[in-house]
Amino acid sequence: MDTVRAFLRHPSGMIGLVLLLVIVIVAIIAPKLFPVSPWEMVGAPFTPPGEDGLWLGGDTLGRDVAAGVAHGARVSLLIGIASALAAMAIGVVIGAMSGYFGGKVDLVLMRMTELFQTIPAFVLAILLVATFNPSLLTIILTIGAVSWPPLARLTRAEFLRLRHREFVEAALCQGERTWRIVLGHILPNAISPILVVTSLTVATAILLESALSFMGLGDPNLMSWGFMIGAGRTVIRNAWWMSVFPGLAILITVLAINLFGEGLSDVLNPRVLRRRS
Amino acid sequence: MSEAAQIDTPVLAVESLSIALPKGGDRELAVENVSFAIKRNEVVCLVGESGSGKSMIAHAVLSLLPRGVGIVAGAVTVAEENPAQLDGRGLRRLRGGKAAMIFQEPLSSLNPLKRVGKQIEEMILAHQQPVPSAAEVQARVQTLLTQVGLPNPQLLERSFPFELSGGQRQRVMIAMAMANRPALLIADEPTTALDVTTQRQILRLIGDLRRERGMGVLLITHDFGVVADVAHRVVVLRHGKVVEQGPASEVLRHPKAAYTRELIDAVPKARLADIHGTIARPEPLLEVVGLQKTFRVKRGWLQPAREVVAADGVSLTLHECETLAVVGESGSGKSTLGRMIMRLTEPDAGAIRFGGADLRQLRGEALRQARRQLQIVFQDPFASLDPRQKVGDAIARGPMAYGMSRTDAMALAKRLLVRVGLSETTADRYPHEFSGGQRQRICIARALALKPRVLIADEAVSALDVSVQAQVLALLAELRQEMRLAMIFITHDLRIAAEIADRVIVLQKGRIVEEGSTAEVFTAPRQAYTRDLLDAIPGRAFFDQPGFAAGNASEFDDRVQRDALKM
Amino acid sequence: MIRLGSLAAVGLQAISRIAQLVAVILVIATFNFVLVRAAPGDPAQVMAGQSGAADPKLLNDLRKEYGLDKPYLVQLASHLGRVIKLDLGYSYRQRRPVVDLILERLPATLLLTVTAFCLALLIGTTLGALAGLAAGSVLDTVFTVLSLVLYATPVFWLGLMLVLVFSVTLGWLPPFGYETINVQLSPLQHALDIMKHMIMPVVSLAAIYLAIYARLMRSSIIEVAQQDFIKTARAKGLSGPRIVVGHMLRNALVPVVTVAGMQAGALVGGAVVIETVFAWPGLGRLTFEALLQRDYPVLLGIFLILSIVVIALNLLTDLVYRLIDPRMTTGAA
Amino acid sequence: MNRREFTMAMLAAGAAIPFGITRAAGQTRGGTLNTIIQPEPPILVTAFNQQQPTLTLGGKIYEGLLKYGADLKPMPGMAQSWEIAPDGLTYTFKLFPGITFHDGTPMTSEDVVFSCMKVLTETHPRARQNFARVASAEAPDPLTVVFKLKQPFAPFIGCFDCTSAPIVPKHIYEGTDYRKNPMNDKAIGTGPFKLKEWVRGSHVHLVRHDGYYLKDQPYLDEIVYRVIPDAASRALALENGTVQLVQWSDVEFFDVQRFKTQQNLEFTTKGYEYFAPHQWLEMNNRVAPMNDKRFRQAVMHLIDRDAFNKRVYFGNAKVATGPVSSKTRFYDPNVKRYEFSVDKAKALLDDMGLKPGANGKRAEIKYLVPPYGEVYQRSGEFFRQSFARAGIDLVLVGTDMAGWAEKVGNWDYEMTQNLLYQLGDPALGVARTYISSNIKKGILFSNTQGYSNPEVDKLFEEAAVSLDDAKRQELYTKVQQILVEDVPVAWTLEIEYPIIYDKAFRNIVTTGIGSHETFGSVYKS
C-alpha cells in the first residue's frame, strides 16, 4: 500500500504509467478503433497524412498507417512482455542456481552468462531467428534467449547477498527447509529488483523486436512497428510518415516503460533514499 | 601577538550555535544553542549517542555541512575567523590550513585511486605560498609520514590506500591533517572503526602531536572510555542540546546530569566482581576440537589465491549454563568460529561434538534436528529480520518447522516477546517499525523459541548505543540463568566480555592465544597480546578503579596533573 | 617495487585474458557448429546457401569436404581446427572465402564503431559529469530528459530521422554510403568526404550510448560526491575544480568504463542496423546482404568475428579499467 | 513462312544490318560509361553463374555466337553467318575471323565446341538442356562450327546469345575444375571490354579490348560498374548524373515514374524481349484445395491484377493473360479472360464445396514468401488481402533462399510466387513449366506445381520439333487456351523493367537482351 502511495507521488514514474496505460488501452481497443485489418489497402498508395481519412497517411500499398500503429501496439507489447518473461524465467533459474549453490555450479553458469553478455546479442538474435525462421514464437524465444544475462546476474547477486544475510541464516538455524528459505525468504526479498529489471527488459525487448523486424526478420503475418519502419525506409523520400509515426510509437512506448520501471525501482528500492539521509 | 594572548584566545569558539535540519526531518534543529571553546593544546571531547548532533557541530566548524542543513543562529570562530562569513578563498585557506579534520572511516576518507603521497602533497600545494619546489614537498611528505610513525615512508607514499591497514590509513589521514601545522584538529570518531590496540596508538599519536604543536583538538566520540583517556574538557550532547560540560575529571567523577550518569554507567566496566556462581562441571555440553579453516580469495587466473587463516586448530569446551566469551580483534576469526559451530561456515577440519554426535558429520534432516539445540543472535539487528515477515511469524516459524501448530507457536511467540520486554501486539508488526535495541530483543526471542541449549551471540550488542547495550546484556544474563543456557559470546569489546563471561578465549589470527577464567585472564594475563588488548581498553585507567584515587599511577591522573601544571 | 609488481600483474592478466579469448572463440565456434546442425534442412544445403549453387554434385563435394558423413565429434574437431586457422568456410553465394569477405568489410565497421564509441564515451561522460555536478539544475533536467528520450529511441529510426532532416529536407549531408562515388579527390578531400558521410551514422549510433554513459556518469558523479574522501578533499581546502578533476572524475569513471565494456556488444549490434540504414559498406551491411540470401557461412563467420571484436574491446576497457583503478591489479577490494 | 523461307531469312539475316543500330556518321571513340551493378555479382564468368548482375557485367566480357533482336530473330554475334539444314538437324556457324581472347590467344571453333559441349553442359543448367539435344559438335576448320542434333528442335537457333552460350577459352579451362579455376578472377573472354579492376564492394572497371574483331569497336574507352547497395542512393546517382545508365531493378519500381520526365534521360522498357519476365502465383496442384481447377480459377478472379500492378509494381508491368508473354513469339491474346470478381470467385468456391466455416473462413493456405526482396513481400501481403475477401486465409511464411528453393523444388509448399524468363521461344521458356516430363523433384524452375495434362504435353512436344512457324503458332495457341482454362498457375504480370540512360549515349538498347548486350556499338555523342 505504501509502495502504491509512494509511486503515485513519483512524478516521472506516473508519467510513464499514464503513457503506458494509454498505449495498453490503444492496443486493447485497436480492433474497435480500426475494425478493418491494418493490412487492408484502403487508400491510394502514398496517401499523405490527413487525406482520404487516413490521418497518419497511407503506405506503399495504400494501407492505413494509423491502423498499423494501433495494431502494432498489440504485437510490440505482446512480444515485449512475453520475451521479457521468457528472459526472466531463464535468468531467475540460472541466477538462483548460481547464487544459491555457489561453487562449481556458479562458476560454470556465470562463465556462460558472461559469454552471453559479451557476445553481440543482436547479431546472435539475427542468427537465431534467421536459422529457425521468423515466427511469433521463434522471435519471443530468441529475444528471451539473448536478454536473460542481466537478469541472471542480478538474481545471482541478490541471492548471494541474501544467502548470507543474517535473517536467512537465522531461518536456516531455525530449521527451516531449503525450499522454504528460497521461496519464503530469499525470493520475496529479491523479487522487487528482479521485477524492475524485467520491466525494463520489456523495453529493450520491444527495441530488439523492432530492429529484427526492420532487418526483415519479423513474423510476416504480424503488423509490427519495426516492420512498418523497415517498409518505409526505402521510400523515405516519398513518404516520411511511413517511418516517422511507427518510430514515434516505439519511442513513446519504450520511454513509458523505462519511466515506469525506474519509478518502480525508486519506490521498491529505497536505498537511494537511505543514502540521501 | 604575545604568547599570553595566544594562550588566552581559544582556537575554536562555538557560541550559541543552532543548526537547522531540512524540513521533514525527525526534528527541526540538529543542534540547539550549543556553546563551548577550545584553547591551545587542549582536547575537548564532544560526547553523545548517535543522532545527538555532535558530527554536525564538527562539520559546521569547517563549513562542511551537507546541503540543506544550515546554521540558523550563533556563530563559530576558528582561529579568529568565522567560516560562515568567509568567501570561497578564505574558506579554502582555513580548511586544511588553520583547521584540519580527520574522519571515522580512514578507508573511505582517502581517495582510493590516488597514491597516498600525492594526497598529502596536494594538501601542501593547496596551502603553501609560494608554492614550494617538488623536492621540498617530497621531503615534507616524508617527514610527515615519519612523524606519524609510519615505517618506510619512501615505499609508503607510493602506496594506494587499499594497500594499507586501517591504522596506517588513519595515520596517513593525520599526516595530511598535520601538513600545514593547523591550530585546530577536528577528529570525528577517528578510532571507532579501528581495533582497540590501534585505537590506543592513534589516540596516543594525536596526543603526542598535540603536545608538540600545541594544537587544540576537538574529538568527537560516543565512548566515555576514550573521554576518560584523552579529554581535558567534555561536552555531553543529547538531541542537539548540551546536557553538561566541564573539565573531564569533574564530569566523569561527578556527573551532574542524569543522562551523563546513565552514559557513564552504561560503559562496560570490566567488573569482575559479580562473577557468577560456581559451575558444576559434568560432561561438557559442546566440545570443539581442532577446528581448521582457511579462506582462499581467488585473484583471477594464474595468480596465487590470497589465503586468510580464520581458524588454526581451535578447540574449546562449553558446559551447561556457562558463558564463554571469545574475544579478538577484527580478522582474528572469532565470528568464523561461531559460524562454524552453527554449521553456517564449513570448517576444513576438526570436530564439533554436541549431544554425543559430531555436528560436522550431520547432513540434511539430521543436521536440521541438531540445529534446534543451537541458536545464534547476530550483530546487525537490521539485517537479522526478514523485512517482509511479521515479527510474530519470524519467531513462530522455527517451532512450526519442527512441527508445532501455528496457534501454539504464535502463543509461544507472544509469551517470548513479553519476556524480552516487548508487548504482545509486537507480533503483528513488521521489523522496520522497531529500533535497533527492540529488534535485537526480537532476535533473542526468536532464538529462544526453539528452547536451545546453546546460544551463540555474535557481536550481539556491538551495533547498539551504549545505554541500549547495557539493557540487552542484562536481558541475556537473566535469560541465561532462567533457561540454563550455555552461551558463547563473541565480542571485540573486552569490557563486555569481562562483564558477562565465566571464561574467556582470546583469539589472534585464528589461534587461541589465551584461555582461562575471566578473573584469571583479566587480572593476570599470561600472554603479551592479551596484555596489549587489556591495556588498550579505553578508559581502563578510570573505570577499572571506580574509587579512582588509589594506587596505580594511571595515565589519566598523570596527564591531568601535567596539563594542570602547564596551565 | 609496487610499480614493477603491478606491471607484471597486468601482464599476467593480459595473458590470462588472451587465454580466455581463445576459449571463448572455441565456444562460439562450437555454438556455430551446433546451430548449423540444429537448423532445419541439410547442413550442406545450408552452407551452399542457394539453389543456384546447390546442385547434387556441389552438395556431395560439400559433404565430403566437411565430413558430414563422419561422426559429430570428428566433424566438430575438424571444424574447430579450421576456425583456429581462421578458415571460416566458403561463401557459395559470393564464391569467396568467408574470412576474405569479412576482413574486407571489417575496417569500415571498426571505423564506425570505434569512432562512435569514443565520441559517446567522451561526450557522454562530459555531459553526464556536468549534469551530475549541477544536479537539480535546469541544465541537469534538460540533460536527463534528453538522455531518457535518446535511450528510448530505436537506433535505426534515429538514423532514418537524421536522413529525413539533414538529407531529404535540408540536403546538407549525403544520405547513404561511405564516400562520394566517381569523383577524383585528393587524399585530404577524400578523408573529409568520408568524414562527411560518417557524421549521421556515427551520430545515430553514438546517441543511445551517449545517453547511457551520460546517465551513468551523472549518477556516478552524484554518488562519488557523497563519498567521504570528497569531504576530506573539501576539508583539505581544495578548490571546487581541483576536487572535481583531482578526485571525482577518475572515481566516477570506474563504473562508466565497466559498463562501457559491457555495452561493446550492444554497440556492435547497433552498428549492424545502422550500416543497413546508411548503406555503410561494413560488416553490418554484409550481415544484411547475407541475411537476404541466408548465406549461413557468412552469417556464422560474422558472428564469430564480431564476438572477437567485442571481446577485444572488452579486453581493452578492462585494461583501461585496471589503469584507472589500481585495486583491480592486485586483486584486492 | 515455310521452312525454306525461314532458312532463307536466317541466311539473309546473317548479312543484314543489325537491327536498331544507329548508323549515323560521327560515331566517336572514347568516353566512359558509369553504371550500376546491383547486387554485386559473386563472379564475372557468365558460364558459371547466370544471375542477372553476372549476366549484365559478363555480357560485356563474354560473347555468344548470336544476338537476338527485339523480334527475337537471330543476328550475327561472333558468328557472321549460319545455316540450318532443311532437315532441321545440322547447324553450321561461320565465325568472324580475327577474334581473340583478352589474353591475346585467338578464339577458334575449338573454343566454341569446348565451351558448349564441355563447360556449359556442366556449369550452365539452361545450356545443359539445350546442348543435351546435340548428337555431335565439330570444328572442321578454325572458323566453322557444326552442331548435329539428335532430333529437330526449332528453337535451337535461339540458344546462342551471350547469356545462353558464352564462349570461354579452352586453353585456360581444359582439364581443370572449372568453378575453382584461379583464372576465373581474370575473366578472360572475347567481348569488347575486358576486366581491368574489381574492387569488391565498390566497383568493377572494364576497359576497351583493343584486339576486338569488329572495326572501330568498341567505341567507349571504359565502363565502370558501381556497386551501390542502397536503392535510394542508386536513384540519387542517376538523378545527379553520377551514373548514366540503370537497368533491371536498379531503380525501385516506385521511383521509376519520376525518371520518365527527366530531361536528359532516355526511358525505355525495351531490351527485355528475350527474357520477358513472366510472373505468377504458383499453386501446388497436388494439394487440396489447389488440386481443383475451380479453386485455381477462383484465384484468378480474386486477384485484382490491375491494382496489383498499380500498388505493388507501380505500373511497371502489364497484366499477363496466360502462360506466354505478349513479348514472346507465338503469343495469342485470344484466350479466356478472368476479370476481377470476388463474387465469381465465391461462386466457384461454393460450387466446389469449399464453404465458409463457422469463423467465416473457407480455407487456410500457407504462402511461402520468396526471399527476393521487398516487392515479393508486398506481393504476399497483397495476395493475403485479396484472398481474405473470399474467406481464404493466406498465412505468410518467411524463409531463406535455400529453404525456398528446397521447399519449392521438393514440392513441399502450398502457394508461392514465381518469376521465369521466357527465353524467346515457348519451347525454351514456357513448356518447362507445364509439361509432365519436367515434373522433376528437387529441380527448381521445373513443373514444380505438378500440373499434368497429356494433351498439353503432346502439343508442346509437337511444337518443339516442328520447323514451321505457322504450324507452331497453331499448336501454341491451342496450348494457351487449354492452360488458361486449367490455370495450373495464376499468371499475374509481365514485368516491364526499365532501362534509363543518359541521352548522350547511343545504341544502349539494340537487341532483345538489352543491357546484357556487349555494348561494343555504344558510343557517346
Image (cartoon, grey):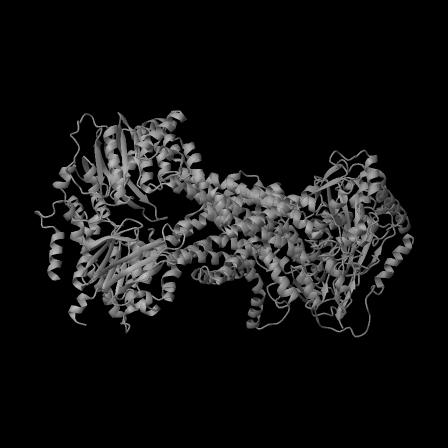
Query: C115 and B561: which one is in front?
Result: B561
Q: Is residue B218 visible?
A: yes
Where residue C86 appears, as percent x and y from the top left, is 51, 52
Quadrant of the snapshot with the C terminus of chain B = bottom left
User: Please, which residue is most extreme toward the left here?
Assistant: B551
Where residue B142 appears, as percent x and y from the top left, is 23, 64
Quadrant of the snapshot with the N terminus of chain B = bottom left
Query: A43 and C156: which one is in front?
Result: A43
Residue drawn 45% across the image and 54% down it: C259
Q: Is residue D255 above or below residue B293?
A: below
Q: Exactly how many numbered labels are in the figure?
A: 0
Question: Which quadrant holds residue C182?
Answer: bottom right
Residue drawn 37% across the image and 35% down it: B426
Query: D448 and B196: which one is in front?
Result: B196
Relative placement, left or right, of A184 versus C31 is left
Where residue D146 appears, as percent x and y from the top left, is 79, 54
